[in-house]
Image (cartoon, rainbow, N blue to C red):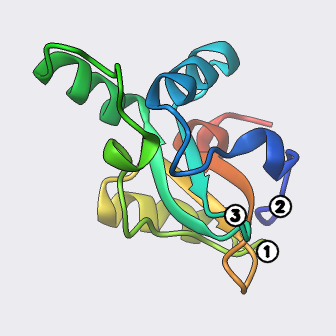
Amino acid sequence: MSLSASADPAQLCVTPEAPAAEAARMIAARRIGAIPVQDRAGRMVGLVSEHDIVRVVATRALGLRGLAVEEVMSRDVLGMQPGTPPEAALELMRQHDLRHLPLCCADGRVIGLVSVEDLIRPS
């Protein structure tokens, strides 16, 4: 078994300019823990997670109001390419204390997102 894309990237990602509240609604509606952030060329530039959103809401009087995704997202996100063995993905997640790992093509385009739960859930 190896990692592969499982969703339409256009439905999976947000842009840096999108309202942070929109990313929060997407995360809640889809019951997922994070959304990759991609530039207009489709390359990953960050990741916005439940943790990122909660941190802002808990520390800012206005919460997410008026903020763009780029103001709350995590940058310098690690990603994996399709075909990566699940064991290697889990090890990378363990080493870097990650819960989500975007799947990206060699050119940086986002094609999926894998969570720890995806990898440890029995098939």
Residue 59 on image: x %, y %: 11, 23
> Which is more toward the observer, 21 or 75?
21
Q: Could you tell me if the residues under marks 3 and 1 are in contact, i.e. CB atoms within 8 Å?
A: no
Residue 54 image-quadrant placement: top left
Is 39 positioned to the left or the right of 19 in the image?
right
Please name which of the two marks, 2 or 3, marks the residue nearer to the observer: 3
Residue 4 is tagged as 2
Residue lying at 43% horizontally and 65% vertically, measured from the top left: 77
Residue lying at 66% horizontally and 14% vertically, measured from the top left: 29
Residue 78 on image: x %, y %: 46, 69
- Above or below, comparing residue 74 to residue 51 in the picture: below
Give the structural element (helix, strand or loop) at label 2.
Answer: loop
Quarter occupied by the C terminus: top right
Q: Which residue is mark 3?
A: 40
Who comes first in sequence, dot 3 or dot 1? Answer: 3
Amino acid type, mark 1 = Gly
> Which is more toward the observer, 25 or 95?
25
Q: Residues within 10 Å of mark 2 (few under 14, many from 20)?
A: some
Is 105 positioned to the left or the right of 22 in the image?
right
Is 54 positioned to the left or the right of 4 in the image?
left
Amino acid type, mark 2 = Ser
Give the structural element (helix, strand or loop) at label 3.
Answer: loop
Q: Which residue is mark 1?
A: 83
